Amino acid sequence: LYAGKRRERGFNQAELIARKALKELTFDNAQLMIDALERTRPTASQIGWTRPQPRENIRGAFRVAHPNKIDGRDVLLLDDVFTTGTTASECARILLKAGAQNVWVATVARTLKHQEALEIGPQFETAQAS
């Protein structure tokens, strides 16, 4: 989370998710690294964008703050919302470049394309009526 955005919100939602996940789930030799990645600049929200816009928005927006903590390790990258996958892909790319052995991505939610939402809609309305 970019520092300005954190100040604006007063919290880092991905950090809250990561802390809860680490507390509730069992990981061997797990270490929470909130500062492993740093945003180097603010980026625009990508909701509603189509490729290649998100890729251009995100490219070069992150750096690995402590490569020595990443080198040779397996990394679970947690994010709050998966929109286009561009942010997760860019973060995984730079983590691997910094020496991570493997990178997995977990998110709490993902956005739906309009057609996907329409396909869910009638089923949801039917379930609500019964």
Image: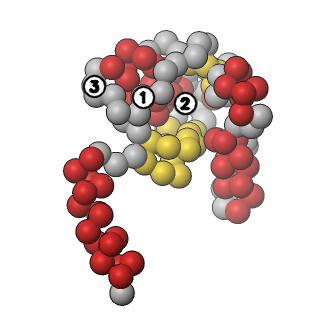
Give whichever of discs 3 and 1 has the lower sequence position.
1
Query: Label 3 vs label 1: CA separation?
Result: 10 Å
Left-right relation of 53 to 37 = left
Q: Which residue is mark 1?
A: 46
Give whichever of discs 3 and 2 has the lower sequence position.
3
Left-right relation of 64 to 22 = left
Q: How dense is the environment of label 1, judged by Cα within 10 Å: few (below 14), some, or many (20 and up)?
A: some
- In the rendered image, the quadrant that contains the C terminus is bottom left
Which disc, if any, is residue 110?
Answer: none
Residue at 61% across, 19% down: 39
Residue at 41% across, 39% down: 83
Q: Amino acid at mark 2?
A: Ala
Quarter of image, res 69: top right
Q: Position of residue 24 (x, y in %)?
A: 70, 62
Residue at 59% across, 13% down: 41
Q: Which residue is mark 3?
A: 51
Q: Which residue is mark 2?
A: 100
Residue 49 in view of the camera: yes
Q: Position of residue 2 (x, y in %)?
A: 65, 22
- Residue 7 lies, with reference to residue 13, above or below; the image says above
Left-right relation of 11 to 104 = right
- In the rendered image, the quadrant that contains the N terminus is top right
Give whichever of discs 1 and 2 has the lower sequence position.
1
Disc nearest the viewer among 3 and 1: 1
Q: Secondary structure at mark 1?
A: loop
Q: Secondary structure at mark 3?
A: loop
